[in-house]
Image: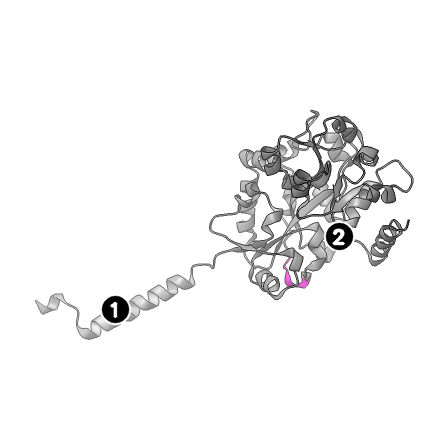
Amino acid sequence: MLLKFLTRREFLNFGKLSLLFLLNSCSNVPNKVRISFEKSFYPKSFQDTIPKNWKQVKMNFESIHSEKNIKTTFKSDFTLINDGWITSLNFKEFEKINEYPLIEKLDNRSRDFLGSFKESLRSKLFPIGVVPYTIMIKNNKELINSARSSWDFLLSKKLTGKIIFPQSPRVVLSIAKKINSSNSLKKLKSQAMLFDDKNMLNWLINSDACVAIVPYSFCSKYLKIDPRLSLVFPNQGVPLMWHFLLTRSNLNNSILIKWIKTLEKKSIVDKLVSQGWYLPFKSDYSQSKYKSEIFTSSVPSQECWNNSWSFPLLTNEQTINLENSWNESLIP
């Protein structure tokens, strides 16, 4: 009867073996992939594509140099960031990412934009989304046709003090260059109600403002709740906001490629575009979203895309010239 039971020594040895097996099993389980980003910059349709077994970590780019953000980035495998914040990161902390086969997925527009960066940065930036700016018009259908043809409509006397501009001088200056008028930047700034990135749409809805210039991906939920709002994409083109993925991890690129492949599903591409997010990939279905010939308020026309522009990094001299142009426009 006793032979059917383990001896005390056998029981202890069995326990040791079980513990070693458990520890070995745990050591073979990879840590959860961490991806950090500022959630307010990304539409829900994009956030929903991030694999469920990844940990999404919030960042706040308004205080990007805070100790909390630095720790968040340091502990993350991947970081998402838009082109306006690239210079805020220490690229020495990131690994190369833009290599074959990932580079093979990119379309000509994203490759051309990457070509504007130094090699030390270019190899660490993977374009994962491009968002066109749009003009949101409130309660004024008459403006739509003139806004569709060019940016000149912004100088209308009816809009004096009723336009909400992005807080970026570079975006505003780029739009001013499209306007067919002398001293266009000074005139454009005189039309401003305010310059705001965070609450521009709340201001548009709840004030006397008539127009706001805003990234398309910020708009979709407001269009659903306020029938007074209309979208316009001028055929002259619009500024583009680029989003990039960076990595600090030695993870095999296969984990990233697997995610990218899910983004290219037709149903997901449709959801992303409906919330203002375009994939910079060369797949036929992704590219079809840039080729709308129909004049509609919901998407940019192909002509608009062809005339749109991006913002490569500025040299020190260019930064000084930009600041001088902006400050000179403040002089009465």
Q: Secondary structure at mark 2?
A: loop
Q: Secondary structure at mark 1?
A: helix
Instruction: Give, as a three-letter code, the residue at label 2.
Output: Phe
Q: Is residue 131 left or right of residue 32?
A: right
Relative image position of residue 10 (x, y in whole percent): 21, 72
What mark, if any, has residue 232 been given in the picture? Answer: none
- Depth check: give the residue in front, 21 or 48: 48
Please say whether residue 36 is one of the residues in the magenta stretch. Answer: no
Identify the magenta region: 92-96
* Mark 2 nearby-residue class (10 Å; few <14, some 14–19, many ≥20): some
Disc 1 marks which residue?
Answer: 14
Quadrant of residue 280 within the rendered picture: top right
- Residue at 66 percent across and 63 percent down: it is 65
Relative image position of residue 89 (x, y in whole percent): 68, 60
- Depth check: give the residue in front, 256 or 49: 49
- Residue at 59 percent across and 38 percent down: it is 221
Quadrant of residue 26 within the rendered picture: bottom left
Instruction: Give, as a three-letter code, the residue at label 1.
Output: Phe
- Residue at 17 percent across and 72 percent down: it is 7
Q: Is residue 2 left or right of residue 14?
A: left
Relative image position of residue 268 (x, y in whole percent): 55, 37
Q: Is residue 153 left or right of residue 107?
A: right
Disc 2 marks which residue?
Answer: 117
- Going from N to C along the chain, the mark reached first, 2 or 1, is 1
Residue farthest left in this picture = 1
Whole-angstrom CA distance, mark 2 to mark 1, is 60 Å
Residue farthest bottom in this picture = 9
